[in-house]
Amino acid sequence: MNTLATPPSSNQPVVVAALYHFARLADNGALQKPLAELCCSLGVRGTLLLAREGVNGTIAGSRQAIDTVLAYLRTIPGLEQLEHKESGAHKMPFRRMKVRLKKEIVTMGVPDIDPLEGVGAYVDPKDWNALISDPDTIVIDTRNDYEVGIGTFKGAINPETGTFREFPDWVETTASIPRDKPVAMFCTGGIRCEKATAFMRAKGYDKVYHLKGGILKYLEEVDEDESLWEGSCFVFDERVAVTHGLRESDEILCRACRNPVTPEEQASELYEEGVSCPHCYNSRSEEDRRRFRMRHQQMLAARKAAQPDSENA
């Protein structure tokens, strides 16, 4: 079975499919145009990254459209066993469709790391609580600081990285992780841990584990009353974040800095829709905020103009 999830509920008409698969794609460039054309013809939106090491991305569309794109991807040599995770959305969470060619489908910047040569041991969501509750286990959140800021597993270490490229340096210069301890790692959907655990193994760590399917699979499968997850999980689309059962949470996106903003932060005097939030206020000038305010007003005007006149609808 190639899917890792059940279909979204019927009151959420948009299917959101998150996917990745490491494979040796000899000519990833030849896949770009037909894949983009197929997605656009079906009304599918989102982003797919193609590299010689595989495919990664998130797409959204109707049930039939998503099934068609996934079936096409699985006809590509090396992607036959492609798995994906599904959630639902009440409206389209992406503005356009992008199929991009990349050197890496998730950028770590360490050339010799190849997940196809060996990664950490996968741990199913149902077994994850027992692993991270062991006092000997070192639990590491491999995501970026702004993601960790709105939710993580209880007791997890935050490397405080701005990008995934910083993770290898953190391990080598800052972390001081004992090599005789079990290390449990997790990320949003699992892809960053493929490279993070491969990197750890290359550095001599033998007891390396990672959450199969990532946080998204855990939130889907583990009951909230048994969950060790605290907060929300940032996702890279207009839903901003999800919580248990993959329900959309209450965070919104700051249009100035692209950071998630919690309900508490939205109440701050530093928050202004489309202009600033507590994360970026002190790093922006009044001229920046004037420019963002003008842009936001233009966006609101364009949105209003695009809506049909209710009297003529």
Image (cartoon, grey):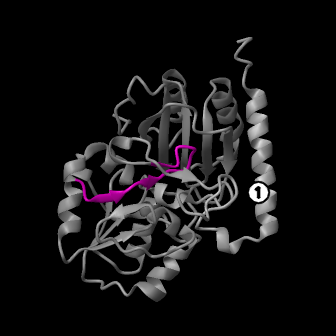
The image position of residue 114, as x and y in percent, is 49, 64
Residue visible at 57% across and 44% down in the picture: 238
> Considering only vertical position in the picture, is 75 above or below 244?
above
Main SS of residues in magenta: loop
Q: Which residues are magenta?
A: 227-241
| Residue annotated with mark 1 | 292
Q: Residue 249 location in percent, x, y?
A: 43, 46
Mark 1 belongs to which amino acid? Answer: Phe
Residue drawn at 64 percent across, 47 percent down = 28
Residue appearing at x 55%, y 55% in the figure: 53
- Measuring from the top left, give residue 263's x and y in whole percent: 48, 54
Q: Position of residue 171 (x, y in %)?
A: 44, 81
Left or right: residue 118 compared with residue 96: left
Q: Is residue 35 above or below residue 310?
A: below
Q: Quadrant of the N terminus?
A: top left
Whether 36 is among the magenta residues is: no
Mark 1 neighbour class, 10 Å CA radius: few under 14, some 14 to 19, many 20 or more: some
Horizontal side, residue 127 vs residue 313: left or right: left
Above/below status of 5 relative to 62: below
Determine the secondary structure under disc 1.
helix
In which quadrant is the C terminus drawn?
Answer: top right
- Magenta segment includes 238: yes
